[in-house]
Image (spheres, rainbow, N blue to C red):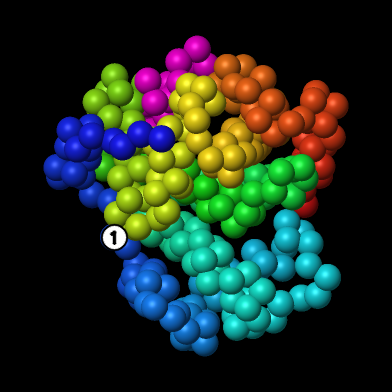
Amino acid sequence: MIDIDDRILSDVKHGFNIPPKPELLSALQTELKSPEPDLNQVAKLIASDVATAAAVLKVINSPSYGLARTITDIRQAVMFLGLSSIAKLVTGFLIKQAFDQKKCCIKLERFWDTASDIANVATLIGQKLKSKVPIENLHLLGLFHDAGIPAMALNYPDYIKVLSAANRNYDTLLVAHEEMHYRTNHAVVGYYLASQWHLPKATCQLILRHHDATLFEETMEQEHLLTFAALKMAENIVHSHKRFVAAPDWPFMKAQVLLALELDEDDYQDIKDDAEELLMV
């Protein structure tokens, strides 16, 4: 893991508009930092926002979790998942609500649909791994990893042109197109946003480096390695499903992803088939 230098963030911090952290998330994080967080208070905070509560129940009762019974209220959800995991689900929902379509030059509904698909497929992959990784980590990273894209679309009226150019030119990653035009990229912006929202440090680092294949060559905790590999596999599966072509960085990462996840080509195809069934629902 690396610590990003303040100089790298200088352009982002100076005059760059990012969505502020919602009050609900601030209150939730404050409660979780207390010496003895109150489960009932956490449930009460989440239940106070009808949309957030409904979204949490929808996610926890989705096929991704495979629960034997339906969770019907927030207190049950908090008891089942635990405080840390429920906070991650809430954070993932709130990031989707934080951007104003009227101020954004890309179609946010389409963007978040894709992010949700990646989050759900990453969760599916996590359930099938021999070495387990918390699926809430995968869901949060799946939703948040590209959050720098709508943030850039919020700040640069011509960003849609850069995004379109990257979609036409698969030989150059989107981050390279962004650097040429803006001297920053969505991974850096996403890292800054995640940091301002006080996401876990490991999640912030994975957001920063989610297009960096050299991450596989570094020593890191097994959980973080699996989370990163599952994200890249999910990205490719969703990208292939929607666009009938592999994700631009998949050819450079596929071997390392499968090695990290202890999967062979047949395992990969089996998971891909299951994921595509999920995406068709």
- Residue 172 image position (x, y, % from top left): 45, 15
**Secondary structure predominantly adopted by residues drawn in magenta:** helix
Q: Is residue 161 above or below residue 230?
A: above
- Residue 210 image position (x, y, % from top left): 48, 33
Examine the rendering and report whether any part of residue 11 can be seen.
no
Q: Is residue 223 above or below residue 36?
A: above
Residue occupying the point 23% across, 34% down: 5
Q: Is residue 86 above or below residue 4?
A: below
Examine the rendering and report whether any part of residue 196 can be seen.
yes
Figure quadrant of residue 37: bottom left
Tell me: 249 left or right of 273: left
Tell me: 191 left or right of 110: left
Tell me: 196 left or right of 206: left
- Residue 49 image position (x, y, % from top left): 47, 79
Q: Is residue 152 above or below residue 138?
A: above
Residue occupying the point 77% across, 35% down: 272
Q: Amino acid at mark 1?
A: Pro
- Farthest left residue in view: 14
47 or 160: nearer the eye? Answer: 47
Which residues, given as a range, are shown in magenta? 159-176
Residue occupying the point 56% across, 52% down: 137
Where does label 1 land, which residue? Answer: 20
Figure quadrant of residue 63: bottom right
Label 1 element class: loop
In reply to whether residue 258 is colored magenta, the answer given is: no
- Residue 50 image position (x, y, % from top left): 51, 79
